[in-house]
Image: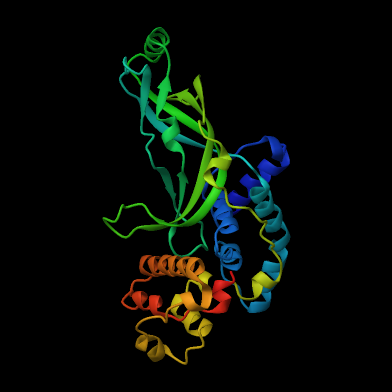
Amino acid sequence: MKISILSFLLLILCCKPVAAYDMPLTSEPVAFLYFQMAEEPLPLQSMMLAAAGDFDNEFERREFLDEQLVPWSVIVGAVEQKDTFNIKVGARIGEYDFTNNYFPLNGIHEETYLTYRSPEGVYGPGLAMEILNSREFRHLNMAPDTARALSEQLGGDKRVTVQFVLRPLSAGHKDFSGGRTLSVFRALGMYAESATILDGDGETELAVLQASSKLTDHSPVERALTKLDASMLADPWAQAWGSREHFEALVSHYNLESWSAFERIQVAQPCVSDFGYSQCQQLMERRRQLVLRCTNTLENDKFCWRIQGLPYTQAEAGR
């Protein structure tokens, strides 16, 4: 991790009460939260080494990793234990609706999301943060007299900044293209409990909106802290489902003797009789997500579809 990122997060920990401070959702907290909530292992070693430079030998590299394990545990733990985060999104106040008494907030969509440049050391699909209940914040309700006063206050510049207070909800791979292209992201789903409308400079508060739904209405995923220990430094890509070397990991995971065996696979055996209908459906969906990830990640994806034909295992079903 770059020193600037470490300094930024440590500054938050040292200078602000953790429970009271809404941490900004930059790409690093998004990554930590995603891996906390998704069924993927945190690529700890690759992230730690990404900006560290080259080492003359493996002993120096391991010494560096051992030294970084404790400070990384503090930072990752601080992010993962937080309940609320914030993000600022640009929007524009539209023309007042006299029938329904509201200003539309143009730029806040039914499916509002931001994409991030993946932190160094994170491979595969890029990161995205989606506000799953953003549709609840598309209207700024107010009486005509109040609306007129606000319009006069803003003058001709109706640009505003919307600062959301967010809570983690879920994580998984998602294609935001609507099927037009294959653009899969590691998507962190967030629930917005409130939104503060600020002027275009982000300084003057104009209004505060509260969510009409509750967090529990959206079936939040239970969060379990990531345990960072030396075992994660041995082989960060040991699990097939988190490996950036998908094909090699899959060959090992399914005990295939070579790629020729993988190429001969056509169709997986039915899994309903082994796992039951509901669990079989979950297995098939996980497999579909892996195929999407494979296709999005690898330049040579002609074999990605064959992943659908891999046999379902008890280990896979028990995750």
Q: Is residue 8 visible?
A: yes
* In the rendered image, the vertical position of residue 65 relative to residue 90, given as above or below: below
Task: Please state, as top left, top right, bottom left or bottom right, where the N terminus lies in the image.
Answer: bottom right
Task: Please state, as top left, top right, bottom left or bottom right, where the C terminus lies in the image.
Answer: bottom right
Give the image location of residue 139, x and y in percent: 40, 26
* In the rendered image, the vertical position of residue 5 relative to residue 61, given as above or below: above
Give the image location of residue 133, x and y in percent: 46, 39
Give the image location of residue 199, x and y in percent: 45, 22
User: 16 or 147: nearer the eye?
Assistant: 147
Q: How many marks?
A: 0
Residue at x 47% of width, y 92% of height: 257
Residue 289: image quadrant is bottom left
Q: Is residue 239 visible?
A: no
Give the image location of residue 242, x and y in percent: 52, 69
User: 142 or 252: nearer the eye?
Assistant: 142
User: 39 or 76: nearer the eye?
Assistant: 39
Residue, far left: 180
Residue 166: image quadrant is top right
Residue at x 51% of width, y 78% of height: 274
